[in-house]
Amino acid sequence: MPFNDQDLFSLQRKVGRYQEVLNNTRRYRETWHQSLKQMIVEQLTHLSSAAGLTGAIEIRSDISNLEAVVFSMGSVESGLSEQIGNGLKRDLIKNNGNLIYQQLFNGKVLVLINFPFIEKYGQPQPPKTIAIYRPEELKEPYFLRHLETFVADITNWEDYDDDAPEPNQRIGFKMNFEQDGAKPTKEEG
């Protein structure tokens, strides 16, 4: 069955759109390497310094074109410890959270927050996605807003109580310590 130009028009439009998306991916990746990664580092450095927010900026580049810029609040002793026998205690470590600018497979940038968590004390919350941006969409005011959201979220995590529980908030303070390999006894289950 022969097809006329009108029949092929829809397919040609879809092929054109596909080629445009592939070209955008190449362009976004080039922008990341040429300027965006450095701009993210500079913005986070400037804003955190101006606000008195102590953190470290890391570049994660294990996989080419899937790099990330991470503003990390670091890890510290949580103040909690577990008894490991013979009068010895092991401090539980708290990761204080991260603000991450992750390059996606298509060159766009995913901005997300990793919440603080204490090892062996509940489960870490899944990351919170702030947004996905094309490189040209990431403007200076967004970085301020991202850091404000990050600080508000980690502050809420630190100040957790049940006065106004978030429906999806799973910090772990209501959970018992996890025990590796612990199985319920016959009386328990």
Image: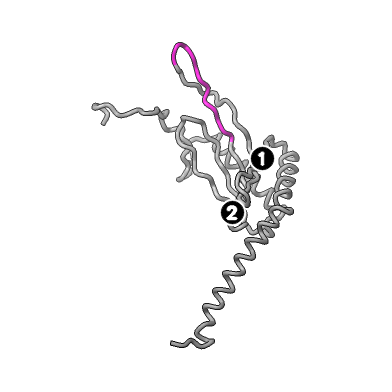
User: Is 5 rendered above or below residue 125?
Assistant: below
Indicate left or right for 43 with 95 as reference. right
Q: Give the percent coordinates (x, y) of residue 26.
A: 65, 61
Q: Residue at x 62, y 61 (%)?
A: 25
Local crowd at mark 1 within 10 Å, few (<14), some, or many (≥20)? few
Residue position marked by numbered label 1 in the rendering = 58
* Relative image position of residue 176 (x, y in whole percent): 41, 29
Q: Which mark is residue 104?
A: 2
Q: Quadrant of the N terminus?
A: bottom left
Spatial distance from mark 2 to mark 1, Cα to Cα? 17 Å
Within the magenta stretch, is there residue 55?
Answer: no
**Where residue 33 is drawn, which disc sits there?**
none
Between 7 and 108, the one nearer to me in the picture: 7
Residue at the image point whose x is 64% and y is 65% from the top: 23
Q: In the picture, residue 74 is in which quadrant?
A: top right
Q: Callout 2: helix, strand or loop?
A: loop
Q: Are marks 2 and 1 in contact (CB under 8 Å)?
A: no
Q: How many marks?
A: 2
Q: Where is residue 159 in the image (x, y as percent from the top left)?
A: 55, 34
54, above or below 65, in the image: above
Q: Nearer the viewer, residue 180 or 175?
A: 180
Residue sitting at 52 percent across and 86 percent down? Answer: 6
Residue lying at the far left of the rendered structure: 186
Span of residues in magenta: 85-96
Image spot of residue 19 (x, y percent): 60, 69
Q: Which amino acid does label 1 sit on?
A: Glu
Main secondary structure along the magenta-highlighted residues: strand
Name the residue nearer the viewer: 112 or 58: 58
Q: Which amino acid does label 2 sit on?
A: Leu
Q: In this view, does 181 lie to the left or right of 135?
A: left
Q: Earlier in the sequence, mark 2 or mark 1?
A: 1
Residue 87 falls within the magenta-colored stretch: yes
